[in-house]
Image (cartoon, grey):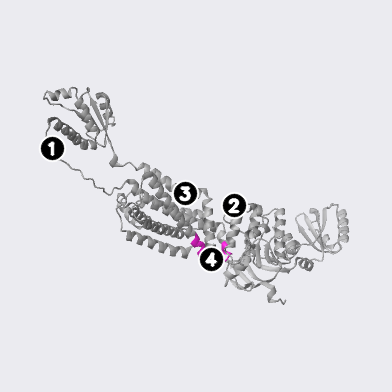
Amino acid sequence: MNTFVQLVIANIKEMARDRMALFWFLAFPVLFILLFGTVFSEDNDTASFSIGLVLEEPDPLGEALAQALGSIPSFNIVSGTHQDELHALEQGDRSLVIVLPAGLSRLLVEGGKAEIPIYYDATRQSSHVLLPVIGRVLDDAERRVTNTPRLFEPRPEAVQSVHLRQIDYLLPGILAMALMQLGLFGSLRLISLREQKILKRLGATPLPRGLLLGSEVTVRLVMALVQTTTIVVIGYLVFRVTVLGSWFGVVGLVLLGAATFVSLGYMLVSFAKSEESAHGIIQLVQFPMMFLSGIFFPVNMMPGFLRPVMKAMPLTYLADALRQVMTGAPPQYSLATDVTVLGAWLVVTFALGIRFFQWE
Amino acid sequence: MATSVNGTVVDVQDLRKYYGQTRAVDGLSFIVEKGEIFGMLGPNGAGKTTTVEVLVGIRRRDSGTVSVLGMDPERQPTAVKDRIGVQLQTASMYPRLTVYEVVRLFCSFYSRCLEPAEVINRVELQEKARTQIKNLSGGQMQRLAIALAMVNDGDLVFLDEPTTGLDPQARRNLWDVVFSLKKSGKTVFLTTHYMDEAERLCDRVAVIDYGKIIAIGSPHDLIKDHFLERAVEFVQPALAGDARLSGLPGVTRVRGNGDRVTLYTTEVPATIAGLMELSEASGTPIKDITVRQATLEDVFLKLTGRRIRE
């Protein structure tokens, strides 16, 4: 037991003193989250519309209308001259421009009819949503002026829906990617120990190989948990991504996923003669997996001929499972399927790795 | 030769290991007695490292019997490894651990171990105890390797070319460590291709070439058995290969090596006098005459016709 603990400690010390490795292990996934999170964090729901309002002359009715428009939450009212606001509309800086003509109050007192020009860009989708809203605001104003009662009174009832932002989709995927890289690239260490003849020297001691391998795997699993904590904390602090599912489930999936990729890594490098070739083989596997496993784009955005490839990749299932458990994203596969596929990968690659790894 | 079983720590009979066509070890038989420094001397590629690797249980043999501390390293590798110390020629160590951390780590591999700080002191690395391995010099690295071979306080310590690549000062320091091992009652099995190292360190030497032992015994006996003579050496290209040299008084053998000529003689003064006459008669002055005792180098040369490092 002491031997095992000493090996794990030695391993962690080696890791912690290697700044480059530390960067790839901790900083890289965090940078990934910050980068992609910022790029994709535009949330359509909180989009606001910039409405240009032109008051041709000061007028109490006009100001009341401006107030009514300004009370709509996603409206951002900008006042300006006719010329300036039309120019802003042409530049795309306004969604709409409403012009309240001079003498509005006087016109209404005299029983006349006031025309209110609304300028919009017919090619913009938002115009078709906004025009009826403006119409409704003007209707309300008119009813108040004419004292006509409402026959239909809308009564809004708030319901909280499952609301997934882009980052909620991305974050579990990036965690899955980080675990994949940890496992795959982590296996290079064994090759490096072999190349440096450290394995040979250890072979001349009574240390059993199983214990050595066990300590390596344990260190990867500990690192996986550290990485998970980092990613979840950053996700919460910066993007308010909360973990909806059980922590128990998340930890379980993280450990299963890390073990699967460690195992896959050992299997891949067991065929490599040198550290360089091992590195090449791993890149060859991890790179396509990173882009084809639905981490950055949902799987149904991918062309059909790639689907079978994606269906075979363990990362697809780890990312899917983590998304379901962490942020409650709609599942691609059932959780049971995800876990079964990952487990199968784990068992098969472990068996092949043990069979083919060359210690010398 | 009859040897008590208690006194024998290594017993090898007809050991063979071939790599394809190459006969790395080709029928070695020898024993190592308790408490001695046993050396295996030979050029690179003679089969020294392969022999060590078979004895310490990290390489399988093709045939022959091997007993290390009364056990077969192939059948009981863990038991053998637990009781021997090993320094391998090529091995390095975790680059980012400190000397102390590596010694302590190795300590945990064995059923019995010395205090890490004490082991580090014995190889005089105490000032480097907190230094990471990657920052050690070649000599310090070798001393660490020997510290790791001592950490389990094993009865038998294998050192494979412990001084290769070291400067003279570092070599001498390492010799002191080897002597201290012997003094503490350990048996040391070392390989080297340095003649002077074998002569200075070893109680007994097996001279090995092409996987075979060509001579075995104490350095003193080996030299005495093969050479009662002294060696007279000089530089004179014109006389190299001259047949008259072997006719000089006392000369038993003549060796030429480029410009340098070595005369093995039982009568040093008579040989030199004769050599001077010859030089004057032929009008070729002789430079740099040196007289020395025969060394293991001469033994190797006599037995193989080659120098050990060519």
Q: Which amino acid, by three-letter code, is at mark 1?
A: Arg
Residue A284 falls left or right of residue B303: left
The answer to whether mark 1 and mark 4 are in CB contact below 8 A is: no
Task: For mark 4, give the secondary structure.
Answer: loop
Question: Residue B208 at what x, y percent from top left?
Answer: 68, 66
**Magenta residues (range):** A202-215
Report the mark closest to the observer, 3 or 1: 1
Q: Which amino acid, by three-letter code, is at mark 4?
A: Pro
Question: Residue A72 at what x, y percent from top left?
Answer: 24, 36
Predominant SS along the magenta part: helix
Q: Residues within 10 Å of mark 4 (few under 14, many from 20)?
A: few
Check the residue under mark 1 and report the chain it is in. A
Q: Which residue is mark 4?
A: A208
Report the mark closest to the observer, 1 or 2: 1
Compute the Cα span from label 4 to label 2.
25 Å
**Are the residues under marks 4 and 2 on the same chain?**
no
Check the residue under mark 3 and report the chain it is in. A
Q: Residue at x 36, y 42 (%)?
A: A39
Q: Which residue is mark 3?
A: A24
The answer to whether mark 1 and mark 2 are in CB contact below 8 A is: no
Task: For mark 1, give the secondary structure.
Answer: loop
Q: Using the rendered view, name the quadrant where residue B147 is placed.
A: bottom right
Residue A332 falls left or right of residue B11: left
Q: Residues within 10 Å of mark 3 (few under 14, many from 20)?
A: some
Q: Which residue is mark 1?
A: A150
Q: Which residue is mark 2?
A: B132
Is residue B206 among the parts visible in the rendering?
Answer: no
Rendered position, B254 above or below A109? below
Compute the Cα span from label 4 to label 3.
30 Å
**Are the residues under marks 3 and 2 on the same chain?**
no
Is residue A23 among the parts visible in the rendering?
Answer: yes
Q: Residues within 10 Å of mark 1 (few under 14, many from 20)?
A: few
